[in-house]
Image: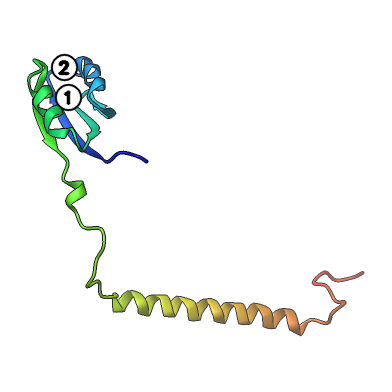
């Protein structure tokens, strides 16, 4: 089973030194312009890893990701009435278009084609 990982943003003095952070977790992205590293570390060891990384001379600041704290299930989500109305209108328009297309095909005799015969 996959271990639980948490995101960490590590601000560094030089992006070249950021490669040394590979031993602490999985590096997701290195920004050369803004001098930070986005990485994932094991949730069980995150406090120890952050304390160890803060002691490195090229690390200026470490920020934890709060993404795991954001709720992803919404209990009181109310449907948007305007969107429901738009979907119903769209459905009615598609059904009317389909009816007209089917109606045109049924008007033609079975053996007749749209091309004229000379």
Instruction: Name the residue rendered at 25%, 33% in the picture.
Output: 40
Residue 90 location, quadrant: bottom left
Coloration of the structure image: rainbow
Numbered badge on residue 4: none
Residue in front for this viewpoint, 109 or 81: 81
Residue 109 location, quadrant: bottom right
Residue 99 location, quadrant: bottom right
Q: Position of residue 8 (x, y in %)?
A: 18, 34
Q: In which quarter of the image is the C terminus?
A: bottom right
Location of mark 1 (residue): 35
53 left or right, relative to 94: left
56 left or right, relative to 115: left
Instruction: Name the residue rendered at 19%, 15% in the picture.
Output: 17
Secondary element at tag 2: loop
Instruction: Name the residue rendered at 57%, 78% in the picture.
Output: 97
Q: How far apart are marks 1 and 2 (CA)?
A: 6 Å
Residue 72, compared with residue 17, is above or below; it is: below
Instruction: Name the residue rendered at 37%, 41% in the picture.
Output: 1
Residue in front for this viewpoint, 107 or 27: 27
Q: Where is residue 62 in the image (x, y as percent from the top left)?
A: 11, 30
Is disc 1 surrounded by few (<14), some (14 to 19) or many (20+) residues within 10 Å?
some
Outermost residue to the right: 118
Q: Which of marks 1 and 2 is nearer the N terminus?
A: 2
Q: Do the residues labelled 1 and 2 touch (CB within 8 Å)?
A: yes
50 left or right, relative to 84: left
Residue 34, compared with residue 5, is above or below; it is: above
Secondary element at tag 1: loop
52 left or right, relative to 75: left
Location of mark 2 (residue): 14
Residue in front for this viewpoint, 89 or 112: 89
């Amino acid at each position: 089973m996959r271990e639980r990982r948490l995101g960490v943003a590590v601000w560094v003095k030089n992006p070249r030194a950021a490669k040394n952070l590979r031993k602490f977790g999985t590096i997701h992205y290195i920004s050369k312009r803004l001098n930070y590293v986005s990485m994932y570390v094991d949730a069980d060891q995150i406090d120890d890893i952050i304390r160890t990384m803060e002691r490195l001379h090229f690390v200026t600041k470490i920020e934890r990701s709060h993404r795991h704290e954001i709720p992803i299930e919404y209990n009181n989500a109310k449907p948007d009435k305007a969107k429901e109305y738009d979907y119903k209108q769209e459905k009615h328009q598609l059904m009317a278009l389909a009816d007209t297309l089917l109606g045109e095909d049924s008007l033609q005799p079975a053996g007749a084609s749209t091309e004229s015969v000379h």
